[in-house]
Image (cartoon, coloured by chain):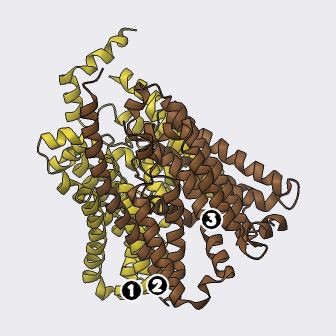
Chain colours: A yellow, B brown
Amino acid sequence: MAKRDAPALSESKPAKLRARAAWANPELLPVAVVLACAALLIIATKILNPGSSLTQQLSAVLVTSIFLVIASFGQGLTILLGGIDLSIGVVAGLSAMMISVLTDGQNAALPWAVPATLAFCGAIGMINGLGIALFKVPPFIMTLASGITFFGVGLGFTSGLAQQPVAPALQALMSGYWLGVPIPIYLIVGFVIIAATFQNGTAEGRQLYAIGSSPQAALVFGLPISGLTILAYALSGLCAGICGLLLAGYSSAATLDIGDPLLLPTIAAVVIGGARVVGGKGIYVGTFAGAIFLSALETIITVLSLSQGLRNIIEGVIIVGALLLQSERWGALRRWSH
Amino acid sequence: MMSLATRLRPARGAAIAVLIYLAMYFVYAISEASATSVFAITNLLDNTIVLAVAAAGLTLVVLTGELDLSAIGVIAIANVVVATTSAGVLGWFGSLVAVMLIGAAVGLINGWLVVGLGLQSLAVTIGTMIACEGVALVILAAPGGEVSDTIANGLTGDIANVVPVAAVIIIGVLALWFVFARTRLGIAIYAVGSDENAAGLSGLNVRRTKLLAFVLAGVAYGCAGYLLSAQTGSGDPRASNTFLLFMYAAVAIGGTSLTGGRGGVFGSVVGAGILTVMQKMLFALGAASFYTNVFSGIIMLVALFVGNLSGLRLRRQRGAEWQSATPRP
């Protein structure tokens, strides 16, 4: 009962500031819960599928999570600003198409094709950011509209046909092993370190939090709001672009709608990770946990061979459930943990 | 406060939308000789009504300052329910009642989660949308089913070979809207959307207003799904997937502010018309079909840009009214 006094203490300013400075803190508790749920799902998958080992299941979940891990970083940045990026699926699809068309099955073209593709995707994100920051178009609409528009452009260039030859190096990247561990897992580790460091360790990252939690205060402090907004959306486009490259390598043929199934799960991953949808709260490690959880869920649903319908119902209920937990119970948990 | 007349006057955006519609229809009519025949007009309106009714429902929620993505889920459920029951157990009327109830139930869940538990409407309705699509897939896993002939023929033809049924439905929707906008609830929806705190202080029940907006929107989505079934004649759990973008495009093009309080169903119906006539126009001009996407996106952004400009002007004007009103007790 003595803990009852804790909340009052935590409301005082220095305590709050200290909490913000050590980015670990109470926000890690929900992250641990999500990761634990993912672990349970992976163990359950193994039990349901006795022929496989636990490490096999774990690496399968991790490898398929790479798309979500990368794309939801960008989504998380825009949500941190109180926005959203609904163009992610289209951008990933365009990226996959573009890399296939540019390389045409030749590794030799990769050194210039990869930067060109990523620059194109980053530029789409930048256009989103420009519209949102300078022309004050609601993020939701701006990204939706640019998504429709660029999908049309992609359709015009490719006539909607699947692009078959994907550079072998990209395919090798997604299916190869190094020291007995799938290469995508190394990519995930590297990406998570960079992403978490950017979002929670750099000045730009902290400024995004400031803008998200109070745009007015950020304006008063003289933060470069427009610049950071454009940066966040450009990074989101870039992440979607990387995702598209990997998708092309993974499925060895690119279609324009290859990224579409990715869009809603990126939002789900961010929400499950404990981010506040109106902005200003949420850490990347949480989003990462959300992505792993969704990937584990997808795997177990596949193993159970549940119908797509049940799969959707479960996913929808989990999103709403995560929102509910976040709004009330986790708030209480967080207060207790202080 | 704005006078009632000012509030109910169609927004500037809606007027622009009507002009765009007329211009596009004109281009379509001169480039395609048969465009003005009863058959072509019926076809055009048939293509419009599903989007128009869905966008009309969405408009109610958007006017209160919330967002709703659940529409495509509800349309999907309604479509498969009609395809599985209308030719059998429920008949055409029973299935209409069923889809309206389903829409109302989903709207109630959305509203309760948003209003009762204070969750973000965008995130909540993403969840309910996915779950509803799942329910639709459980009811009908693959395209199929059968829509009763009463629905399929009755809602797509012409009355006495002159008046398209779709035109009657659109006029009905607009008539309902003009009555509804003048009811207590209709006015409350605008008040809540333009300033929630002020609306609450002046005695309006903000929570109830938002909840009812979600429920009515759900009913509209259910009806849109019913109309979709009449068009397609069968059930497809994924038929509504492309609707989401175009519903918001219709609302935005019609001049409804996506932050609430400004606009109306009239504009959204015209917006839906624009998106449909645009496809016909581009096709008649011989443009490749992908231009439709590019055009939709650009028109949407232009509409928003114009809407933002007039919104700023309105806000400034309202600010002035507010200042002149404050000294009074």
Q: Could you say which is closer to the camera, residue B151 or residue A115?
A: B151
Q: CA distance from mark 2 to mark 1?
A: 7 Å
Q: Residues within 10 Å of mark 2 (few under 14, many from 20)?
A: many
Residue, disc 3: B49
Q: Quadrant of residue B183?
A: top right
Residue projecting furthest to the top:
A2
The amino acid on which the numbered mark 3 sits, given as a three-letter code, is: Ile
**What quarter of the picture does the C terminus of chain B occupy?**
top left
Crowding at mark 1 (Cα within 10 Å: few <14, some 14-19, many 20+): some
Is residue B106 visible in the rendered image? The answer is yes
Give the residue drawn at x 24%, y 56%: A133
* One can see residue A246 in this view: no
Q: Position of residue A240 (x, y in %)?
A: 36, 65
Label 2: chain? A
Dot 2 corresponds to which residue? A163
Residue B218 vertical placement versus B169 (above, below) = above
Are the residues flagged by discs 2 and 1 in contact, CB closer than 8 Å? yes
